[in-house]
Image: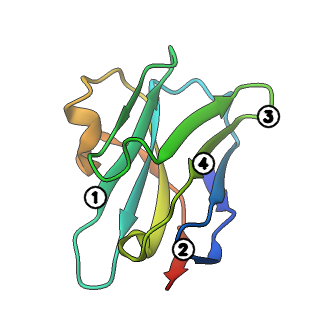
Amino acid sequence: QVQLVESGGGLVQAGGSLRLSCAAVGSSFSFAAMGWFRQAPGKQREVVAVITRGGITNYSDSAKGRFTIASDNAKNTVYLQMNDLKSEDTAVYYCAAAREDQTMYRLSQRRWYDFWGQGTQVIVSS
């Protein structure tokens, strides 16, 4: 009965910033890793950022240098800080959690995650 609840999406101008949150409900947050994926209309869902239980992070090429993933175990929450947003960042953003330890390569793929949030819309205008 684990649920991931995303929040923080909305409309923002190009060059602006936005912070997404993902709260794990019904769990002690004992996950091997959590990640953020996004899906634009007509496109495949793709990984944006990943963070492991030990705090190791990884980013897609488009996110690197602009986005930061972080976790707050006290609040059972994972965040995605997005800066210098571009029109191509427009998408529905999904939070995901993996129970078992995986390589960073596998954590870039959807099939290795066990739980998914409902998604939060991010629209970047220009």
Labels 2 and 1: the sequence-earlier one: 1
Read off the residue under disc 1: 46
| Residue assigned mark 4 | 81
Q: Which residue appears farthest toward the right when viewing the image?
A: 74
Where disc 4 sits, the SS reads strand
- Label 3: few (<14), some (14–19) or many (≥20) C-alpha neighbours in 10 Å: few
In the image, is 16 to the left or to the right of 37?
right
Decide which of 84, 8 is in the foreground and name it. Answer: 84
Which secondary structure lies at badge 1?
strand
Q: Are marks 3 and 1 in contact (CB under 8 Å)?
A: no
Residue 96, given in percent of the width and then of the height, sits at: 46, 48
Query: Mark 2 or mark 3: which comes first in sequence?
Result: 3
Q: CA distance from mark 4 to mark 2?
A: 12 Å
Per the image, the residue denoted by label 3 is 75
Colour scheme shown: rainbow
**Could you say whether the residue bearing mark 3 is in a helix, strand or loop?**
loop
- Residue drawn at x 55%, y 54% is 82
Q: Disc 1 and disc 4: Cα gap in Å?
A: 17 Å
- Tag in front: 1 or 4: 4
Please report whichever mark, 3 or 1, sits nearer to the chain's N-terminal start: 1
- Mark 3 and mark 2 in contact (Cβ < 8 Å)? no
Is 7 rendered above or below residue 109?
below
Measuring 80% from the left and 26% from the top, which residue is drawn there? 74
Residue 53 location (% of width, % of height): 51, 19
Q: Which residue is mark 2?
A: 122
Q: Nearer the viewer, residue 70 or 4?
A: 70
